[in-house]
Amino acid sequence: MVIHSIVWGAAVHRDQLRHSLVECENVEVLSHRAEALRLINEELSLVCQGKIPSEALLFSILSTTMDFRHISQPTNEDQPRVHPFRLAHMPKGWDFLDMQVNYAHVSGLFMLVDRLGGLTALRSHPVAKIVAILDSLMATLELRAPLQPWVEVDEIASLAADLSLNVLNPQPESAELLTPGSSLPTLKRLVGSSRLGLVFYRLQRCFAVQSALMRGELQNMNLRALGGEIASLHHAILSMPPCHDYIGNNMLYEPVRLVSLVFDVGILVPMSPILGLIGRLVRWIKASLECIDLENVYDERVELLVWILFVGGVAAKGMMSERTWFVVRICGLLQRQGMKSWPEIRQLLRSFVWVSDAMDEEAIDLWNNIHDHESLEV
């Protein structure tokens, strides 16, 4: 069963890389798939009779029946299909990353995992890892918390915790600019969640490491440790409870949580714009801010809100009405703060979490919209 499944799974993978169906339509390969499915159905029949599912069954299901070759069509409300961030690591064949998942199949797979005692009870780490990745994919498409906890072998966990790996080459900060992430303690205090605050500390560190990697300045590089941290952070962001599940009455918590999701699906593990995830998040950020009386917000919360609005405004590229809404709100807050130049704004944005290479160009475009709206000095 496993061997037949591997043959079919390898053919699907090869076709995905080539954006073709040549291997999958091979008669010999199709015979392997047919035999694998026959054996899978035999064991599933035994499971229905009370037998505990085997890990070989899980692996065979994963290898045989998961086929991501079809492109899903987003609803109109999930438009636009443009990506707001300039990503140097933009995946090749971006449109082919769009996936249509058989939800009933995935739900059944998770039921089998539960019958075995969950991911942590699986003896085969590769199987547990694949199920966890699939779980994260499903959660990403629905922008919800994953069903299963993220699993990682001790070796990878220790690599991610090893401070001697992926060391940033220290660069002296300009006297005119705040240290990146210097406002994160304020963010943590204002949102009232140490867990959400930790997510942004990890995001700031992860983006700095990725930037150094792209510039060739990362010392003692270890891609396994970086990949493990990205997967773990992705899972942590998806697992942050939404406002209605959060204990407390902090109005800033939800927009900040949604901003973390924009960074997540927009830059950390970028998803194709055709899926409409960022467009959905922009509308949710706007709705969460409409619950706040922005005209009567003062003190350090203004700077946090400016950052939230800028992230939302940049993410709203191609969304005319939402973009205008963010521009108008930013204008009001900036006039109250007396900020009238892009260097001042960029300094504020960098003091939270900001990915200059990916976001500055679009942020300047947003700034020009603001300047046109209120005739501010550039």
Image: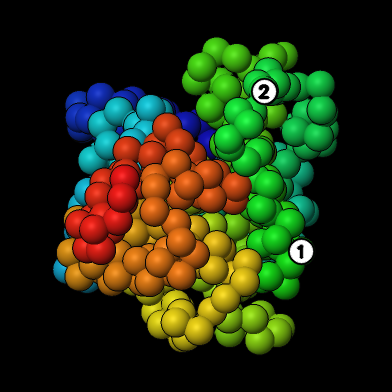
Which residue is under mark 1? 194
Residue 120 lies, with reference to residue 358, above or below; the image says below
- Mark 2 neighbour class, 10 Å CA radius: few under 14, some 14 to 19, many 20 or more: few
Image x and y of residue 287, in percent: 39, 79
Image x and y of residue 213, in percent: 56, 20
Image x and y of residue 336, in percent: 46, 70
Of 102 and 277, nearer the camera is 277
Q: Is residue 75 left or right of residue 245?
A: left
- Mark 1 neighbour class, 10 Å CA radius: few under 14, some 14 to 19, many 20 or more: few
Of helix, strand and loop, which one carries label 1?
helix
Q: Quadrant of the C terminus?
A: top left
Image x and y of residue 332, in percent: 38, 71
Total of numbered circles in the picture?
A: 2
Residue 37 in sight in this render: no
Which residue is under mark 2? 172
Please identify, in this view, whether the residue under mark 2 or under mark 1 is nearer the observer.
2
Coloration mode: rainbow
Of 173 and 113, nearer the camera is 173
Of 58 and 222, nearer the camera is 222
Q: Earlier in the sequence, mark 2 or mark 1?
A: 2
Residue at 25 percent across and 50 percent down: it is 368
